[in-house]
Amino acid sequence: MSKTYMEYIDEISSDELYEGLLAYGFFAEKLPPIFTSVPFFKYCKDSNVNFSKGWNEHISFRVMRNINIPRVMGIPNPFKYQRLCSEISRNWDEIRNHFRNQTNGQAFCISRIHIRKKYREKCIFEMNYKNWRFDGNPETELLINGKNVSRLIVQADISNCFPSIYSHSIPWALVGKDNAKKTINEKCWYNSLDQLCSDMKNGQTHGLLVGPHTSNIISEIILTVIDKKLYDKGYRFIRHIDDYDCFISNNEEANLFLRDLEEALMEFDLSLNHKKTKIINLPIGIEENWKHVLSDLPTESKTGEVSYHNVNKFIDTALNLASEENNLAIINYAIKKLKCLNLSKNGKDLAAKRLMHMAVIYPYLMHLMEEYVFNPYNVEKEDIKIFAETIYEEAKIKNDFESMCYAIYYAIKYDFTIDTFQNNYQEEQRYIFSSKDCVLLLITWIYFMKQNNWNDRATQVKPIKKVAKSLKKGDMDRYWIFCYEVLSQGNLSGDWREMKKANVSFIEDFKNNMQ
């Protein structure tokens, strides 16, 4: 029995929401897994904090999408993020009522990616849900909807969705544009959400940060209103965050849907990405053909293992399909599937070598290596070292700071040195300082601190500390996590100093488990 949108929403208490957003929804999943906001959450909860108001800039960093195009993501100022999480939690009943009003009476769950409690996890948001037992499969139900037969699917996409969301549109969605404008100067909870979102972007009213899970809550507040407008006009569709699949009878209706969708988006200062708009004739496969191909592969031998030959065949097939479909997500899928299978020893060795080679070519795979390659295939430390040094050098040529971060992270995690760092550390540090990349600066500092047994006076560490002092004076907001972790409490002030006094760190297993 599939669940409704509100059944998922109602399962989450305000306290669970607050913890999920602040402790587990602060850092984007694409970052090297060395960051945590759990200590910060505990500090906020135990200290009953009341952080100062005002605007602050955020940290920006680039990650590779599966099409090898960079996406800019953000790490918010922690104090501003806590205030927003607190405000959302405090008004959770009002927000739930909003979701209830927008989804009440809908025959199926339109938003396929939404907030929910997860089994044995405290994180309340994940990028992909497709469990038909709980989420249903409305795509098949919409093929014949009453007396209407779907002959077309209209695929549409919101242009640059999160960066385009106007903070003033939050009150518009919650209480209507007219009421919002009448009460714009009043101290209302919905105006607070507006203000706190802009506070995280240095007072800018356009754009939500990509990465923090609060952005998913805020976007749903707006997009469920758009969903209702379209649903009430008779359209039957599915939405995956900002992607729409609408089931339509004819071309005239398809064009009407696109017009009505564009009008609904314009009410909230959003627009369609016309380059991604498609009208597709039905019937088509519900799932992509490549999934069916890969689901039957690789085959097991009589011993219950997947042989070297079959592992090789599976990877070849995945690469060919990715090339034919122009969809590198197929490789992502294949890597995750291989982990779940019982590979022979030779099969594991082959998989590790080929998948690490792919990650060098396609850096967007980098975040999968530890969980899906190194650990399940028992990759030797020396091989990880060679891989890390290779991607570091390759990434440096392309100014791919994300991959450089992962290379250094692997050295920290698996306890080896990167020879370039050891032999030419002054030159490498000059390059990294010139990158102006906050995450790269921080991971470099952790690396050298660990190499020097956490001696912050070490020759290799002192220049990094000097950079942190300089940035703290002139650009603390855009480098806050680097400055905060590197500097002592005597070099900090205000909320930063108080938090440092409490020994709060945003680095996972700081010192204790990384030596």
Image (spheres, helix red, strand yellow):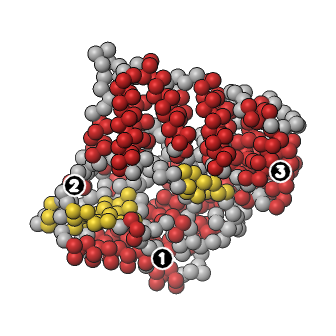
Q: Which residue is mark 3?
A: 467
Residue shown at 53% from the left, 34% from the top: 356
Q: Which residue is mark 2?
A: 284
- The quarter of the displayed image where residue 53 is located: bottom right
Q: Which residue is mark 1?
A: 269
Residue shown at 31% from the left, 55% from the top: 4
Label 2 residue SS? loop
Amino acid of disc 2: Ile
**Mark 1 or mark 3, earlier in chain:** 1
Amino acid of disc 3: Val
Question: Which numbered mark, 3 or 2, is in the foreground of this view?
Answer: 2
Residue farthest toward the top in the current orientation of the protein: 303
Local crowd at mark 2 within 10 Å, few (<14), some, or many (≥20)? few
Question: Which numbered mark, 1 or 3, is in the foreground of this view?
Answer: 3
**Mark 3 or mark 2, earlier in chain:** 2
Q: Position of residue 509 (x, y in %)?
A: 67, 34
Residue shown at 43% from the left, 42% from the top: 332
Marks 1 and 3 close (CB-CB < 8 Å): no
Can you say whether 58 is above or below 66 in the image? below
Marker disc for residue 393: none
Asked if residue 37 shows in the view, the reply is no
Local crowd at mark 1 within 10 Å, few (<14), some, or many (≥20)? some
Marks 3 and 2 close (CB-CB < 8 Å): no
Separation of residues labelled 1 and 3 (CA atoms): 41 Å
Marks 1 and 2 close (CB-CB < 8 Å): no
Residue shown at 56% from the left, 55% from the top: 70
**Mark 1 or mark 2, earlier in chain:** 1
Asked if residue 293 shows in the view, the reply is yes
